[in-house]
Image: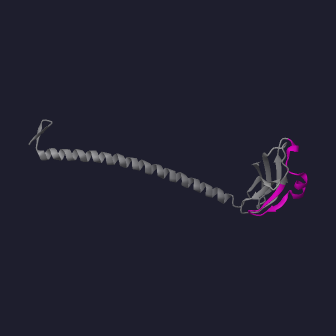
Amino acid sequence: MPLFYAGVLMSFYEGLSLVVACIAVIMSLVAWTGQRKLQREANDMQRATSKLAEKQLEMLLREEEGRGKARLSADLFKDGKTHRLRIRNYSAVVARNINVEILVDDPRDDPLIDSEKLSKLPWPSLAPEAEFAMIAALTLSRPTAFNVLLRWTNPDGAAVEEQVFVAL
């Protein structure tokens, strides 16, 4: 049985071939759009991986740069009935001549006891992962959150000053 298509007489097998070819073209287009989507996702993943590698390299460089430097932290904690200000060395090198200053507007709001400051500061040296604590007299009239100025000397002789916020 002959078919008419665009004014051309076609046999059954030619019509069947045309239908199969059209189906193949549609399937190719579907596969092509799917591949484009997958390629776009792969490119996005590659960009993300590249950014992650840059960040890791940056972190490694910063870590390498800071290996010979001490890093100190400060925090307030409750020890039984008293409060204490703890200074901790969380680096791999020794920190020397550690000094602590509480930054408050009114010197009467300084929670560190004067006798503690006189007897303990400057702290001679603080080994890696070591800490020391000083009694903090916190009352209702004194703030329970404040800035602490830490000063110390690195093993290379460089003086460091860092401000840390502490809160109970």
- Residue 102 placement, left or right of 61: right
Of residues 60 and 16, the one drawn nearer to the viewer in this rendering: 16
Q: Give the residue at x 12% y 35%.
A: 7
Quadrant (top left, top right, bottom left, bottom right) of the N terminus? top left
Residue 54 in the image, given as x and y percentages of width and height: 56, 53
Bounds of the magenta segment:
106-134
- Residue 98 placement, left or right of 71: right
Residue 93 in the image, given as x and y percentages of width and height: 74, 63
Of residues 154 and 99, the one drawn nearer to the viewer in this rendering: 99
From the viewer's perspective, is residue 20 above or below residue 59? above
Q: Give the residue at x 72% y 60%.
A: 91
Residue 63 in the image, given as x and y percentages of width and height: 65, 58
Q: Give the residue at x 20% y 44%.
A: 19
- Residue 162 placement, left or right of 5: right
- Residue 160 in the magenta stretch? The answer is no
| Image-quadrant location for residue 5 | top left
Residue placed furthest toward the front = 81
From the viewer's perspective, is residue 68 above or below residue 22? below
- Residue 107 in the magenta stretch? The answer is yes
Color style of the picture: one colour
Number of on-image labels: 0
Residue placed furthest toward the top = 7
| Image-quadrant location for residue 154 | bottom right
Residue 48 in the image, given as x and y percentages of width and height: 51, 51
